[in-house]
Amino acid sequence: MGLQVPGSITASKVSSFKECGLAFRLSVIDKIPQPITPWTLRGTLAHTVLDRLYFRYDGTNRTRERALELAEEVWAEALTEGALSGLESTATNLHSLHREMRTLVLQDFEAEDPTKVTALATELRLETSLGGVTLRGVIDRLDLNDDGTLTVTDYKTGKLPGEVQENERLSGVYFYALLCEKVLGQRPSRVQLVYLRDATRIVASPTEQTLKGLTSRTEAVWRAVCNACEREDFRPRPSKLCRFCCYQDLCPAQGGSLSLLETFKVSHGSRKDGSRDGGASDGLGN
Ligand code: SF4
């Protein structure tokens, strides 16, 4: 009978499928939510603060003071809206999380100069179809350069990647460039990954060739996902990411068993679709 084919594909889903087929299946098809961790929450909060900073204020008003005011606003909302409820909310944990979120936000001022940025959009949702599949993405920030070209910015809160992972991360942000080209009719002249923790940017220029290659690879991943669904064959791929994986009890490579899936779904619930694309994935552990 086969498994339900996902309705769309995002940069993080492509990356997740390549990292481990079984984890992809459990997250994307069975929709078993991954637990909230301090580092994912810290990243979400920092993204929200920067989103507001660039959306609400023009260049000259994007100061550290404003950023910290927004950090307090976002933190207060997280406390009142229960965003922290999935965590072990001891006073020490909350204090660290609050401090780390503020630090990440301020690091953006070290990585780039927010006063010089002309932000056209933040949290920009785009989608298009490609070879029978819908591509979706949420772009952290789309900037207008002085020469009229576009820059796609993607914030990262994990650590700076090594060379191999860097290419994988760039594939994620090239995916957004591809969406811009298809939906907005303009290929961005630059993409940049802003690593907040290390206050470092990785900048690249997508060429026609780059996006052509990405299109072929995305179509190939999509075909592989469809085949795996048809055969119900999503294999585990053990790697160093396993230690961060929340599906170990279901994973044969870790001594678990998929026969526990239904019980697992009941105890962990299952996620509704429509959640934010995790961006160009930081990876399971970052
Ligand atoms: S534990 Fe490792 S191999 Fe198993 S599902 Fe998770 S990431 Fe894949």
Image: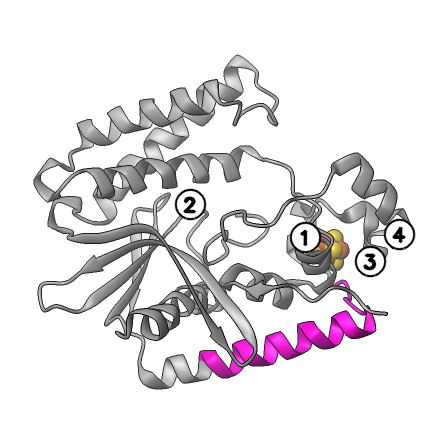
Measuring from the top left, give residue 274's x and y in whole percent: 55, 49
Rendered residue at 73%/60% (across/down): 238
Quadrant of the image occupied by residue 106: top left
Q: Secondary structure at mark 1?
A: helix
**Could you tell me how far apart the alpha carbons at marks 4 and 1 are, in whole angstroms?**
16 Å
Q: Which mark is residue 253?
A: 3
Judged from the image, the secondary structure of the residue bearing numbered disc 2 is loop
First to last magenta residue range: 214-237
User: Label 4 belongs to which residue?
Assistant: 257
Q: Which mark is residue 272?
A: none
Query: Does the CB distance between marks 4 and 1 fall below 8 Å?
Result: no
Answer few, some or many: residues within 10 Å of disc 2's Cα (few below 14, many 20 plus, some between 14 and 19): many
Nearest to N terminus: mark 2 or mark 3: 2
Q: Earlier in the sequence, mark 2 or mark 4?
A: 2
> Quarter of the picture for ligand 1?
bottom right
Q: Which element is circle 3 on?
A: helix
Amino acid of disc 2 = Thr
Tally of numbered discs: 4
Magenta stretch: residue 31 in it? Answer: no
- Residue at 35% across, 70% down: 183
Which label sits on residue 27? 1
Three-letter code for the amino acid on which mark 1 is drawn: Ser
- 2 vs 4, front mark: 4
Q: Is residue 237 visible?
A: no
Q: Which mark is residue 157?
A: 2
